[in-house]
């Protein structure tokens, strides 16, 4: 079945540091890929998405590129802020009609001032 | 995208009791998903609820423990029955929005503590 393998945390960075959170997936066909963010005490919010190979999703300075050749969707941000401290989830949904999401394990990010 | 109102946002319940969680969507959706997020863990799909048919449960989840209702295309409930401390989790509903792979909207979650 489908699976998502996500870089284990926790990750602690200083403000303005570069962020990479690795995500690789296993799926049949051409899944859609997502990054969700969960701020402390809040629900899940969609951060960005990509629906086909070589698509780049971007939002709030975060980027991720759908790499089919390496089955990866790594999350990057050039300069993190304290307000980016949250848990980040990589997820996929199977190709075709809307299906449930398969989530990675989540990565806790803490940004220190 | 759709907006989901989920309630309650949190509850503390006694062992052996049941809690019903509600999700109201501001638009009609065919499919609704219920997830569980155990403390410090990722999200696990409990079941998929389609209007007019029985919910489809994932391995490890059964209807007697997590009965689901889906009376119309904008509303669903999940009941956590005969609760034990192991049921302490965040429960979330989700709906697909905008067609294939466009996105999924989540409710704000119900933080359940069983004592």
Image (cartoon, rainbow, N blue to C red):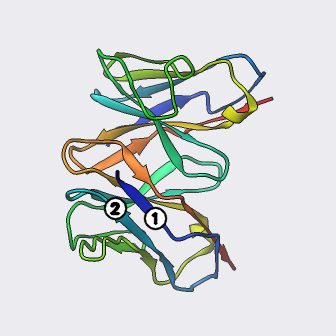
What residue is shown with label 2?
A26
User: In the visual, does B46 lie left or right of B111?
Assistant: left
Q: Respond whether the residues carrying marks 1 and 2 are from the same subunit.
A: yes
- Residue B87, compared with residue A75, is above or below; it is above
Q: Secondary structure at mark 2?
A: strand
What residue is shown with label 1?
A5
Do the residues under discs 1 and 2 have CB atoms within 8 angstroms?
A: yes
User: In the visual, does B30 lie left or right of A40?
Assistant: left
Crowding at label 1, few (<14), some or many (≥20) Cα neighbours within 10 Å? some
Quadrant housing residue B73: top left
Q: Nearer the viewer, residue A84 or B39?
A: B39
Q: Secondary structure at mark 1?
A: strand
Do we see residue B97 in this rendering?
Answer: yes
Identify which residue is drawn at 61% across, 70% down: A9
Residue A42 drawn at (x, y percent)? 59, 48
Residue B39 drawn at (x, y percent)? 67, 47
Which residue occupies the extreme right position in the image? B115
Q: Nearer the viewer, residue B82 or B71?
A: B82
Crowding at label 2, few (<14), some or many (≥20) Cα neighbours within 10 Å? some
Identify which residue is drawn at 46% across, 64% down: A5
- Residue A12, compared with residue A33, is above or below; it is below
Q: What chain is tagged by disc 2?
A: A
Residue B26 drawn at (x, y percent)? 36, 29
Rounded to the nearest whole Å, what is the CA distance between mark 1 and mark 2?
Answer: 8 Å
- Residue A65, compared with residue B8, is above or below; it is below
Residue A20 drawn at (x, y percent)? 48, 79
């Amino acid at each position: 079945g489908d699976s998502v393998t996500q870089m284990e945390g926790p990750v602690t960075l200083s403000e303005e540091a570069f962020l990479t959170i690795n995500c690789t997936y296993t799926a049949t066909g051409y899944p859609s890929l997502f990054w969700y963010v969960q701020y402390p005490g809040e629900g899940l919010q969609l951060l960005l998405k990509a629906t086909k190979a070589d698509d780049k999703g971007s939002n709030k300075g975060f980027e991720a590129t759908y790499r089919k050749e390496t089955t990866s969707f790594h999350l990057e941000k050039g300069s993190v802020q304290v307000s980016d401290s949250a848990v980040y989830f990589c997820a996929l949904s199977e190709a075709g009609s809307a299906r449930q999401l398969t989530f990675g394990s989540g990565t806790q990010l803490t940004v220190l001032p | 995208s759709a907006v989901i109102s989920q309630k309650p946002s949190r509850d503390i319940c006694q062992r052996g009791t049941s809690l019903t969680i509600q999700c109201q969507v501001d638009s009609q959706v065919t499919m609704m998903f219920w997830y569980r997020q155990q403390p410090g863990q990722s999200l696990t799909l409990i079941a998929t609820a389609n209007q007019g048919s029985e919910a489809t449960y994932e391995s490890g989840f059964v209807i007697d423990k997590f009965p689901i209702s889906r009376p119309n295309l904008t509303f669903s409930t999940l009941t956590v029955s005969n609760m034990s401390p192991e049921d302490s989790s965040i429960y979330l509903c989700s709906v697909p929005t905008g067609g294939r792979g466009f996105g999924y909207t989540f409710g704000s979650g119900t933080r359940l503590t069983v004592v």
